[in-house]
Amino acid sequence: MFRVLITDGLHAAGMKILEETENVEPVVKPDLTPEQLVEELAERPYVLVGFLAWLILVPLGITSAQAIRRKLGKNWRRLHKLTYAVAVLGWLHLLWLSRSDVGDAVIYGGLFVFLLGYRLAGRIRFAAP
């Protein structure tokens, strides 16, 4: 089960890299000044949020190798809790990207909240004396 989760995480990181290369192309142009870049990002905040999610995914993908996990020890679990931040940023990215048809974004957000609540409820149940 654990190997499947790591593989799924690496697939998510790979897909995000491919998506970001597609999203960044229209924003980053060779003759773009810093002022124009800020203006472009203000017009398309979903690009900035998606890029931030990608920046968080990079170390998660790099540290998924078993040798690195062993070296990091308990810090690996702490680092990989950033997955929740990536999920929230990914949801926000999808919500802003969908603009008028937010149905899918609402469904995915509700599913994330449900699964997170289920996980927290299990943790609270096992932590109680």
Image: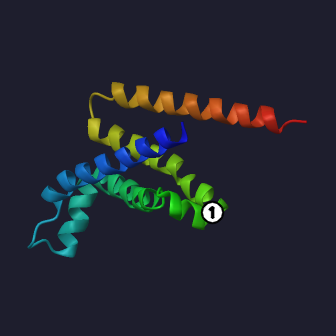
Looking at the image, which is closer to me, 15 or 39? Answer: 15
Q: Position of residue 30 (x, y in %)?
A: 9, 71
Q: Position of residue 63 (x, y in %)?
A: 48, 61
Looking at the image, which is closer to me, 90 or 66? Answer: 66
Q: How many marks?
A: 1
Q: Residue furthest right?
A: 129
Which of the 4 image quadrants contains residue 37? bottom left
Callout 1 amino acid:
Asn
95 relative to 118, above or below? below
Q: Position of residue 102 (x, y in %)?
A: 33, 29
Q: Position of residue 69 (x, y in %)?
A: 55, 60
Local packing at callout 1 (Cα closer than 10 Å; few below 14, some 14-19, many 20+) is few
Left or right: where 5 falls relative to 30: right
Q: Residue furthest front?
A: 67
The residue that appears at 14% across and 58% down in the rendered structure is 25
Q: Which image quadrant: the C terminus?
A: top right
Q: Which image quadrant: the N terminus?
A: top right
Disc 1, SS: helix
The residue that appears at 33% across and 57% down in the rendered structure is 51
The residue that appears at 47% across and 46% down in the rendered structure is 6
Left or right: where 58 falls relative to 45: right
Looking at the image, which is closer to me, 96 or 72? Answer: 72
Look at mark 1 in the image and give the residue it sits on: 75
Q: Residue furthest left?
A: 31
